[in-house]
Image (cartoon, rainbow, N blue to C red):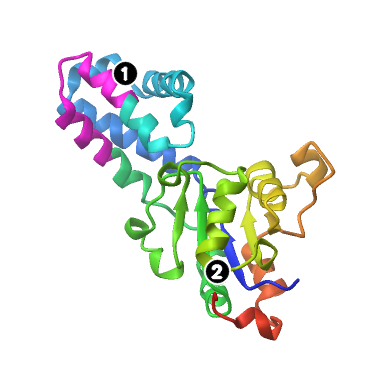
Amino acid sequence: MRIRAITFDLDDTLWPIAPVMLRAEQRLDAWLRAHCPRAAAAYPVEAMRALRDRIADENPHIAHDFSAQRRLSLRAALLAHGYGDDHVDAAFTAFYAERNRIEYYADALPALDRLRALYPLAAITNGNADLDAIGLAPYFHFSLRAGAFGTAKPAAEIFHAACARLGLAPDEVLHVGDDPELDVIGAHRAGLRSVWLHRGNATWTEASAQSEVRPDLTVRDLGELVDALGDAPEADARASPR
Ligand SMILES: [Mg+2]
């Protein structure tokens, strides 16, 4: 595979997202109980989750922006109980700080350390992780977040924007991610090479529910990606972005 840069998905690729979201919801609940008790009583964790889902359904124009969905649901919950936008901002800040406290998969940082010495790396995420807050920004030339960019994976636009910022053609860029549709099929349709990072047991056919698109490479962890790419890259893979 002749590639000159690698783009990475973040959630469920570099860290598991479910425990992060659970802790962030609990942190938000604790903050609301301390500062907005009437809203906290009306919206315990399960009810807040349902409210957020409903707000997301009702606002398809922000389907790509989880931060906007969260802010809007907090606003609905808090303003209805007599709290103001200052409380909305502070509640979001409490939630978001916890959302950026992640625990990496054991293979993530060693692989990034190895690969960043060989290729320019960038992040493409549909989530709202803040790489500066997480401490991961130095690994990546940039991070494209769907919320800020305006379009989410699997749309080709966000992949093409990443390639443009890298100064590379799509087929010179390898995208790595866990999600068959968002990462592998999205990247493939945009003309990139794709790696399916699959830590589970399902086959590609089972996981993707279609067979026309296949990942260029499937790995069980990022160490396998390093084994495939990191040891003997073709000479031109070391080139910096044009
Ligand atoms: Mg993911």
Query: Which of 136 and 68 lies nearest the eye of the viewer?
Result: 68
Instruction: Specify the farthest residue to the right.
Output: 211
Secondary structure at badge 2 equals loop
Question: Which stretch is magenta?
Answer: 73-94
- Quadrant of the image occupied by residue 108: bottom right
Residue at 48% from the left image edge and 58% from the top image edge: 104
Residue under numbered circle 2: 167
At label 1, counting other C-alpha atoms closer than 10 Å, the crowd grade (few under 14, some 14-19, many 20 or more) is many
Residue at 71% from the left image edge and 48% from the top image edge: 189
Count every numbered label the image shows and give the total: 2
- Give the position of the N terminus as an image quadrant: bottom right
Magenta stretch: dominant secondary structure: helix
Foreground label between 2 and 1: 2
Secondary structure at badge 1 equals loop
Q: In the rendered view, does 241 fall on the left or right side of 93?
A: right
Residue under numbered circle 1: 43
